[in-house]
Image: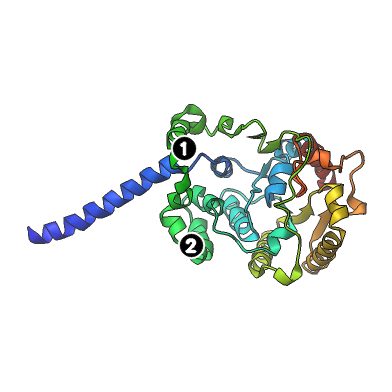
């Protein structure tokens, strides 16, 4: 009997901690469109996969790409998505079906800044289905940056205590259960048609989040994992193309030196890897009748409004095919 109690008490304690942990995850972690993305790549097959950063999330409409090309496309770009994340997202996609083409949206700022431990740095791992890729991703990122994020994801959302009621209500609704997008409309942007659609923003624009390329600060992990991604594509005969989306003319003019240095560096780097690089801020890639003024963007960094994103996507589709 004593031995039974010795075994029972630790088991009860572990189960109680696990139940509390699951409850806090449910109550504190908001519904994320990453959940929709993961559902898409588990249930559908795609010919074209877009990977990258928030510029890709805001600037590339997979719906427009599909309509223009007839190729089924999915946009897996995210704010906070580094090449390391993109590599494991692609591996997860390939567990369902190998795509014909991967388009990687390159923002030089992600290649010279460290991967931070913000709440969003764990979103992909949290929503990723149980798989061998997820196990590998854990050892490649979660264990290195902060293993607690995998064990106690709610910890990074502990500031959401005041919003617990609303978060729970959303998760109990039909929209959440059916992977709907109603929860992501905030009056200024919405997640719809497979990308984040920005409403035009009049007046002054923000410049505070602009990160410029500095080779001296290069993040070696970004280079290492991008090269792993390139190698993965090559071995599986997946075409890989790299693009940089347009930024406002005002930004290019103000920081001409930094943008020219970034373009020269990545043109040479990607040529060395045998990859095509389409920088839509360079003269030879400028889009006719495209509004490059700050009015067409929500900030100096280069997040497009929905009309410009759809216009850019139409041109990208034409260039891809």
Secondary-structure class at tag 2: helix
Residue 150 at least partly seen: yes
Occupied quadrant, residue 225: bottom right
| 10 Å crowding of disc 1: few (<14), some (14-19), many (20+) | few
Element class at badge 1:
helix
Camera-side residue of 274 and 316 = 316
Whole-percent x, y for residue 169 in the image = 44, 31
Q: In the rendering, at what x and y percent does residue 181 appear?
A: 58, 32
Report whether residue 136 is seen. Answer: no
Determine the residue positioned at 76% across, 37% down: 305
Contact, mark 1 vs mark 2 (Cβ under 8 Å): no
Task: Out of 50 and 176, give the one closest to the viewer.
Answer: 176
- Quarter occupied by the C terminus: top right
Residue highlighted by disc 2: 146
Question: In this view, which residue lies farthest toward the left?
Answer: 1
Between label 1 and label 2, give the one nearer the viewer. 1
Question: For the residues marked 1 and 2, what is the alpha-carbon distance in whole angstroms?
Answer: 25 Å
The numbered mark, 1 or 2, whose residue comes first in the sequence reads: 2
**Neighbour class for label 2 at 10 Å: few (<14), some, many (≥20)?**
few
Mark identifier at residue 163: 1
Vertical comparison of 269 with 20: above or below: below
Is 71 placed above or below 233 here? above
Quarter location, residue 235: bottom right
Instruction: Identify which residue is drawn at 27% across, 50% down.
Output: 15
Instruction: Judge from the rendering whether residue 127 lies leftward or rightward of residue 62; answer left or right.
Output: left
Q: Quadrant of residue 46?
A: top right
Q: In this view, does 45 lie above or below 192?
A: below
């Amino acid at each position: 009997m004593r031995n039974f109690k010795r075994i029972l008490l630790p088991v009860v304690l572990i189960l109680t901690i696990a139940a509390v942990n699951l409850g806090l995850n449910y109550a504190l972690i908001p519904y994320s469109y990453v959940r929709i993305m993961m559902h898409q790549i588990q249930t559908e097959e795609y010919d074209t996969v877009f990977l990258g950063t928030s510029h890709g999330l805001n600037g590339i409409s997979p719906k427009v790409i599909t309509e223009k090309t007839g190729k089924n496309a999915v946009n897996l770009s995210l704010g906070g998505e580094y090449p390391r994340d993109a590599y494991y997202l692609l591996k997860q996609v390939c567990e369902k079906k190998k795509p014909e083409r991967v388009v990687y949206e390159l923002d030089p700022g992600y290649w010279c800044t460290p991967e931070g431990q913000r709440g969003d740095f764990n979103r992909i791992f949290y929503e990723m289905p149980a798989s061998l890729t997820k196990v590998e991703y854990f050892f490649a990122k979660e264990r290195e940056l902060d293993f607690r994020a995998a064990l106690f994801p709610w910890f990074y959302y502990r500031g959401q205590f005041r919003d617990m009621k609303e978060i729970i209500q959303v998760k109990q609704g039909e929209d959440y259960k059916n992977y709907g997008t109603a929860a992501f409309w905030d009056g200024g942007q919405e997640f719809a048609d497979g990308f984040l659609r920005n409403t035009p923003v009049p007046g002054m624009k923000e410049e505070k989040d602009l990160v410029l390329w500095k080779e001296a600060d290069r993040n070696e992990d970004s280079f290492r994992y991008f090269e792993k991604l390139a190698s993965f594509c090559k071995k599986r005969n997946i075409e890989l193309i790299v693009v940089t989306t347009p930024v406002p003319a005002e930004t290019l003019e103000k920081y001409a030196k930094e943008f020219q240095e970034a373009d020269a560096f990545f043109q040479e780097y990607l040529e060395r890897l045998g990859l095509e690089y389409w920088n839509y801020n360079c003269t030879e890639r400028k889009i006719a009748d495209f509004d490059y003024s700050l009015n067409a963007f929500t900030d100096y960094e280069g997040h497009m409004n929905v009309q410009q994103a759809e216009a850019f996507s139409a041109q990208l589709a034409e260039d891809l095919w």
